[in-house]
Image: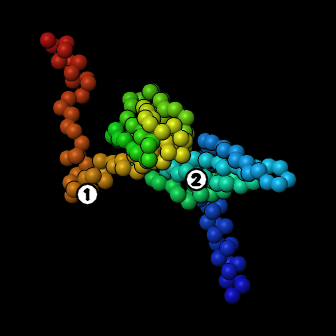
Amino acid sequence: MAERDNNRRGNRRDREEQTPEFADRLVAINRVSKTVKGGKRFGFAALVVVGDQKGRVGFGKGKAKEVPEAIRKATEQAKRKMIRVPLREGRTLHHDMEGRHGAGKVEMRTAPQGTGIIAGGPIRAVFEMLGVQDVVAKSIGSQNPYNMIRAALDGLSKESSPRSVAQRRGKKVADILPKRDHTPQESGQVAEEA
């Protein structure tokens, strides 16, 4: 029995080592104090965003008496609660969206190549860990980093790719996407003729 338990633990460790390397970003640390008879006791709460920069992202929070332990707990929780987000061309979102959580509201828009990440604070960390390169985002309402991140992840979880929409509707991807009548080269030739 003990041998089997050791084997299970060993397999879990092997599985953790095989998972792809994740990048993490510390978003906020909060220090709280409790006054006791001998003085004050401090505790720390950490908010961490983790992602593989290829379309997966998650966040976690951890509390402990020491900062490194709080960060470690938050990182572990974030790895457990990751979501997958489909990206267009691996650099931006497929469509504009809005996410909400409590009083937090986040609007996210696709952007042309070269725009960069135009987002503030905690939301910027989410997009960097997700691997998005071009996006415009605006936080409206709550400035609490926990609510901002939850609102951003709520919006990102609603995103759907043309492939998933086509599959759900039983059509081809070409039928879903808007048709382009002519290429830029053809329009240049037309202008020259006129």
Q: Nearer the viewer, residue 29 or 25?
A: 29
Q: Residue 96 falls in which quadrant of the image?
A: top left
Q: Residues within 10 Å of mark 1 (few under 14, many from 20)?
A: few
Q: Residues within 10 Å of mark 2 (few under 14, many from 20)?
A: many
Q: Secondary structure at mark 2?
A: strand
User: Is residue 7 toward the left or the right of residue 143 in the image?
Assistant: right
Identify whether 188 is placed above or below 98. Answer: above
Badge 1 or badge 2: first in the primary sequence: 2
What's the residue at 67%, 73% (across, down)? 9
Q: Nearer the viewer, residue 107 or 76?
A: 107
User: Looking at the image, which residue sits at the far right?
Assistant: 38
The spot of residue 7 in percent (x, y) is 68, 78
Position of the C terminus by quadrant: top left
Q: Secondary structure at mark 1?
A: helix
User: Looking at the image, which residue sits at the far left?
Assistant: 194
Q: Nearer the viewer, residue 189 or 126?
A: 126
Residue located beneath label 2 in the image: 60
| Discs 1, 2 touching: Cβ within 8 Å | no
User: Is residue 102 toward the left or the right of residue 25 in the image?
Assistant: left
Quote the CA–CA distance across marks 1 and 2: 32 Å
Q: Nearer the viewer, residue 30 or 132?
A: 30
- Work out whether residue 77 can be spotted: yes
| Residue type, label 1 | Arg
What's the residue at 68%, 72% (across, down)? 10
| Residue type, label 2 | Gly
The spot of residue 150 in percent (x, y) is 48, 48
What's the residue at 55%, 41% (across, down)? 145
Q: Which mark is residue 168?
A: 1
Identify whether 78 is placed above or below 110. Answer: below
Position of the N terminus by quadrant: bottom right
